[in-house]
Amino acid sequence: MSSDRPGGPAGVVPGDDHEDDASVTHEATGRGSRRARRDKPAKKGSLLRELPVLLLIAFVLALVVKTFFVQAFFIPSGSMEQTLHGCTGCTGDRVLVNKVPYWFGEPEPGDIVVFKGPDTWTPEVSVAEPSNWFTGAALWLGRAVGVAPPSEDDFVKRVVAVEGQTVQCCDQEGRVTVDDEPVDEPYIFENNPMESRTFGPVTVPEGRLWVMGDHRSASADSRSHVSDRYGGTIAVDDVIGKASVIVWPISRFGLLDDPDIQAAALAPSELTASRVTAAAVTPWAIGLVGAVPITAWLRQRRSAED
């Protein structure tokens, strides 16, 4: 039987396939547009729901890092000039204080340490404490990133003698001695006049440190508190960490030196062992361990996006 329409079998009209394809394409495009419109608000709502969680995670991580690993400090006084700037009229240094080195060891002579001063020490700076929770939180955050002055009982000094050692001043050349050996202190800035340098002898008790400022004539350190019940010393347990890096201003960026100031008093084997310790290796080990899961997560995320 012949077709009712020319050009093909019965019921088939030339061009119908194209019309059907166009109809399907248009319908699919419409569905895609509607789906895109539905997905966009969903993604935005999802981000808003996740934002508080992300902020909480960031806060917790910042707190963990500040408590256990590293903390930024602002240097408000000139007692460590010129190693650390805190002089009147200059830009105070911001330093990173590394807490990891003292997980497995104790401060050594030559280390620059930040510590909580004993209750017998007079603050070197005056800091107005916050009057409400908002300003308190802002001050805490500022101290965490090193842009706000530290607490009044936070000090930064250099370790000169440790437990069991006897420290005093002076030898014939006006130098501080530890166990009757002169200490090599190339970092001293503006020392006291020779006639006013005398102190000691003081034997440092167990678990305590004798500390002094590099700006020797402008530092209220262990020498100024030698008559208190601690003999001028501070507790190892009150040490917050080791000042390791100047991070601001950029012009002064660099590592802080911790010279072997008692090198003359140590045997060669003791000198070598004192600097090759687990504390020196630990920060790098922690960095490598922490990098593994982060790298794996980033790789997994890239694969999912592809």
Image (cartoon, grey):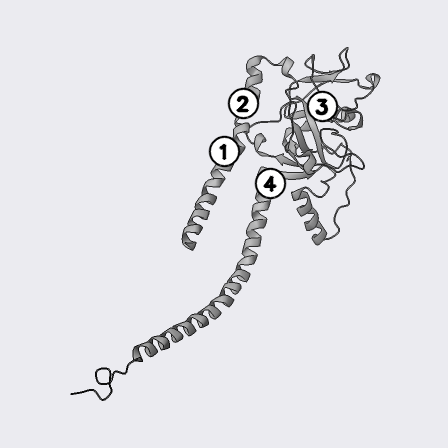
User: Mark 3 is on which residue type?
Assistant: Tyr
- For image coordinates 77% across by 42% down, the residue present is 127
Q: Position of residue 120 (x, y in %)?
A: 76, 32
- For image coordinates 83% across by 19% down, the residue present is 193
Q: Which residue is mark 4?
A: 67
User: Mark 2 is on which residue type?
Assistant: Val
Residue 264 is marked as: none
Residue extending furthest top? 172
Spatial CA span between label 1 and label 4: 19 Å
In terms of secondary structure, where does tag 2 sit?
Answer: loop
The numbered mark, 1 or 4, whose residue comes first in the sequence reads 4
The numbered mark, 1 or 2, whose residue comes first in the sequence reads 2
Spatial CA span between label 1 and label 2: 15 Å
**Label pair 4/2, CB-CB below 8 angstroms:** no
The numbered mark, 3 or 4, whose residue comes first in the sequence reads 4
Spatial CA span between label 3 and label 1: 31 Å
Q: Nearer the viewer, mark 3 or mark 4?
A: 3
Q: Which residue is mark 2?
A: 276
User: Mark 4 is on which residue type?
Assistant: Thr
The numbered mark, 3 or 1, whose residue comes first in the sequence reads 3
Q: Nearer the viewer, mark 3 or mark 1?
A: 3
